[in-house]
Image (spheres, coloured by chain):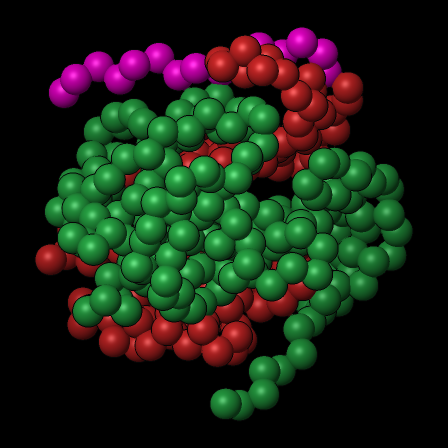
Chain colours: A red, B green
Amino acid sequence: MPKPEPPKPSRVLRQYFQHQGVKFRFVSQRLRFPNQTEGDREYIVHPGGAVAVPITEDGRFVLLEQYRFAVGDYIYEFPAGTLEPNEEPLITAQRELAEEAGYTAAQWDDLGRFYLAPGYSDEMLYLYLARGLEVLPEPPAGDDDEDIKLVYFSTAEFLELAARSTLTERPCMDVKTLACFQRAQQVLG
Amino acid sequence: MPKPEPPKPSRVLRQYFQHQGVKFRFVSQRLRFPNQTEGDREYIVHPGGAVAVPITEDGRFVLLEQYRFAVGDYIYEFPAGTLEPNEEPLITAQRELAEEAGYTAAQWDDLGRFYLAPGYSDEMLYLYLARGLEVLPEPPAGDDDEDIKLVYFSTAEFLELAARSTLTERPCMDVKTLACFQRAQQVLG
């Protein structure tokens, strides 16, 4: 495996302000970019996230129909959550599958890592395929405000759902969920 | 086409602060959610974004290898940008294809709309397939700080790139780009 090149961070010339939120930090800075131009930029400093792509024995994807305050609506998405300090992303994915969907999985496969919103967040998202699902008799408690219902889609139903998004029908999906589906299809063949 | 249900926004009980950035607003609020629980939340209020998925006559995807200050690195992604006030998303996608990639396209197909980062942003992302590409002799100027190189991937090369992300190789891709590829494959058949 070739050693990755080091990343190329911008130089922080000045920090105008920062706000430490519950799950991430928001900063506003004057930056000098690698091409030597400068600019004022705001973005989210995030610990990273992990997603579980759970598939049942009969090939159905397990999704959440979940309330998301930021978009003010219920949306379809795979179970996901924020990394705790020093937490391995796989552990995060396993915890979120248990808390949000009430499942454990016997087999976990690495689907890779992708940036979530590189326009304004440094969040790296780690994707895992979760197979060999078992229902937890007593799922651990999640966050208080979670408002979640489980939904199951076959590959055909998932594709139909993705295509329906051209009709601006609700509930919507997020790009993470569609990207996870793509990687799962690629690995499942 | 069935009429979509109205969305279900949370009730803002108090706004702690807000910061108006160049491209979006950051807010910190106390919210009451539809399930009647309450919580303090921060998120980005965003005008929305649009992506062009350009494909050449011989079936290669046109991607940018672009510097992104938020992640401090160069990444692979499809041309995309933020909606101007009252702008149709298709116009945004057409502008970004011209400015960032230096192309016009004769045929545009709607690939749907998906939330980008519903954990902390209300950004809706609109996807378009762009075919019948023509190189612009004099591409319009983009943002000053843009640091972009064009790269071309066949379907097989794109899939290999996505799979390599399990090896933590750089440059990385973002979930938007992978989601766009999935929708493009679905439409192209």
| Residue at (29% x, 25% y) in the render | B170
Q: Which of B30 and B158 is in front in this view?
A: B158
B118 in relation to A87, above or below: below
Which image quadrant for residue A136?
Answer: bottom left
User: Number of callouts in the render?
Assistant: 0
- Residue B34, percent from left and from top: 71, 69
**Residue A96 at x, y percent in the picture:** 44, 49
Image side of residue A53 versus residue B42, left or right: left
Q: Is the magenta stretch mostly helix, strand or loop?
A: loop
The residue closer to the viewer here, B23 or A29, is B23
Residue A111, x across and y down, in percent:
25, 43
Against B107, residue A119 (above or below) is: above
Lateral position of residue A93 relative to residue B96, left or right: left
Q: Nearer the viewer, residue A29 or A137?
A: A29
* Residue drawn at 45 percent across, 73 percent down: A166
Q: Where is residue A184 drawn, in percent x and y?
A: 23, 54
Indicate the quadrant where residue A40 lies: top right
Instruction: Name the residue nearer the viewer: B36 or B7.
Output: B7
Q: Is residue A108 visible?
A: no
Extreme residue toward the bottom, this view: B2
Residue A10 lies in the magenta-colored region: yes
**In the rendered image, is residue B168 in sight?**
yes
Using the image, determine if residue B40 lies above or below residue A28: below
Residue at x 24% of width, y 52% of height: B56
- Report the magenta residues as a range: A1-15
Q: In this view, does B14 lie to the left or right of A46?
A: right
Quadrant (top left/top right/bottom left/bottom right) for the C terminus of chain B: bottom left
Residue B132 in magenta stretch: no
